[in-house]
Image: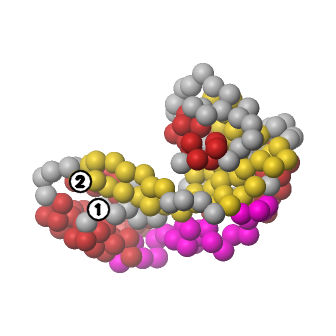
Amino acid sequence: MFEYLAGLCERHGLAWDCATGNGQAAVSLAGHFDEVIATDASSKQIDSAIAHPRVSYRVAPAETSRIASASADLITVGQALHWFDSDKFFAEANRVIVPGGIIAVWCYELCVVSTAVDAVVDELYQGILDGFWSPERALVEEGYLSIAMPGSEVQSPEFDMQLNWRVDDMLGYLRTWSACKRYQSRHAQDPVGIIEATLKAAWGSSKRAVRWPLRIRVCRL
């Protein structure tokens, strides 16, 4: 995906990875750009970011990056656009991007493992955690389709992320969900524990491929 996005850019001087988290996307972009500026509103995230000689990390909100005008060839936002004031962010992106530059935003919803495993995860997601997801989650579920993007949209190929996990890896991942934390705070009970035995039975003892389809929107500004 990062190779594809770099291929859309006329130049490869600077990429801005907005809401970088711990810098996973920023480090991948560094393989294709001379410099990457990676920003996040959370100083805690920036403090734990992955070091790379071509990536400079800064604490800054998406809407006021303090990056020089007309300087970035590519702007990326991974799994974070739903938290932004999108109008203000896109205004900032238009300021920072070079003429003809690219902005790419993507998100992912539920992972795909197998029919049996997916049914158990869906029971947690749609059933047990119903009412505990933030309203912004609806934007992720629809793949950001209702957000008015700036510039001229580029039709892009499909991409996904994939890992090989054992069931304990999946259980640990599910417990990071924000809705799980809200549920546990209200009920003093681990919601993942409710489906743990069923998930282990459906999973088995071996490693399984876990795939997250990415929903990506790309525009030339």
Give percent across and percent down for residue 10. Answer: 75, 41
Q: Are marks 1 and 2 in contact (CB under 8 Å)?
A: yes
Viewer-proximal residue among 129 and 70 = 70
Query: Which residue corresponds to the image point at 82% horizontal and 37% vertical from the top-left?
Result: 71
The answer to whether residue 129 shows anywhere in this view is: yes
Query: Which residue corresponds to the image point at 85% horizontal and 47% vertical from the top-left?
Result: 99
Figure quadrant of the C terminus: bottom right
Q: Inspect the image, locate mark 1, and give the three-letter code of the amino acid beneath it.
A: Val
Q: Which structural element holds mark 1?
A: loop
Over which residues does the magenta segment extend? 127-153
Q: Real-space Cα distance between discs 1 and 2?
A: 7 Å
Q: Which mark is residue 195?
A: none
Residue beneath disc 2? 208
Tell me: 221 left or right of 171. Answer: right
Q: Is residue 76 above or below residue 185?
A: above
Viewer-proximal residue among 22 and 213 = 213
Viewer-proximal residue among 12 and 122 = 12
Give percent across and percent down for residue 122. Answer: 33, 72
Q: Which structural element holds mark 2?
A: strand
Q: In terms of secondary structure, what is the magenta stretch mainly?
A: loop
| Crowd class of label 2 (few under 14; some 14 to 19; many from 20; radius 10 Å) | some
Q: Residue 186: which quarter of the image?
A: bottom left
How many dots with numbers? 2
Q: Is residue 208 above or below residue 12?
A: below
As drawn, the residue found furthest toward the top would be 53
Tell me: 62 left or right of 139. Answer: right
Residue beneath disc 1? 113
